[in-house]
Image: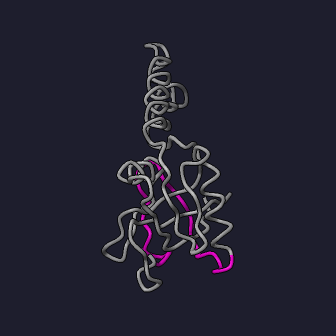
Amino acid sequence: MHSTIYQLGTSPISEYNYINPDNITEGDTVGFDYAKEVAHGERKTQLEKLLEILPKGMLTLNHDLSITYNGGIDEWRLSYAGLIKEKAEAITPDKAMTWTGPVYNLQMAVFNPLDTNCLFITDYGTGYGVAERSIEFMRLINLLNPGDRLYAGLIADYYF
């Protein structure tokens, strides 16, 4: 199976600063075999797919392939808190130690609230990047004000 890794930041990322797919390490709950950069012509399609996993209207893809934040994080945080509460309430003493079950579902809700196989690199100043689940992307969005932009660096297919 495969999905996409997105390197994202709040300022433009020159091609020189794209993370090399060989320099990506795995974050918590992440595992993959290898990654390879998508063709330049596929970047727009991959960014459009990214916007599809978010609440409608939260982000807009611009002609220069930057992404504008339109708002909506407050509502999303409310639903996220509700999701965590719902998953936590499903944990009972007799199910607390099962390998897959409510504890695992809670863990996935915390680390991957967008319920996606996409991974995100939001800290990459050293030339290396840690591929993380969607909570890191949402933490980045949480720092934005309406009208702020996000910029993509590396966009890679990864295989797991």
Instruction: Kindly indicate the quadrant of the structure image that contains residue 35.
Output: bottom right
The N terminus is located in which quarter?
Answer: bottom right
| Side of 139 where 75 appears, left or right | right
The outermost residue toward the front is 147
- Count of numbered labels shown in the rendering: 0
Say above or below: 89 vs 133: above
Residue 75 location (% of width, % of height): 47, 35
Q: Residue at x 38, y 53 (%)?
A: 145
Say above or below: 92 vs 160: above
Residue 4 location (% of width, % of height): 60, 62
The C terminus is located in which quarter?
Answer: bottom right
Q: Residue at x 43, y 86 (%)?
A: 16
The outermost residue toward the bottom is 16
Q: Nearer the viewer, residue 10 or 5?
A: 10
Q: Residue at x 54, y 60 (%)?
A: 32
Residue 23 location (% of width, % of height): 43, 74
Q: Is residue 21 magenta?
A: yes
Say above or below: 20 vs 60: below
Q: Residue at x 54, y 26 (%)?
A: 101
Residue segment shown in magenta: 20-41
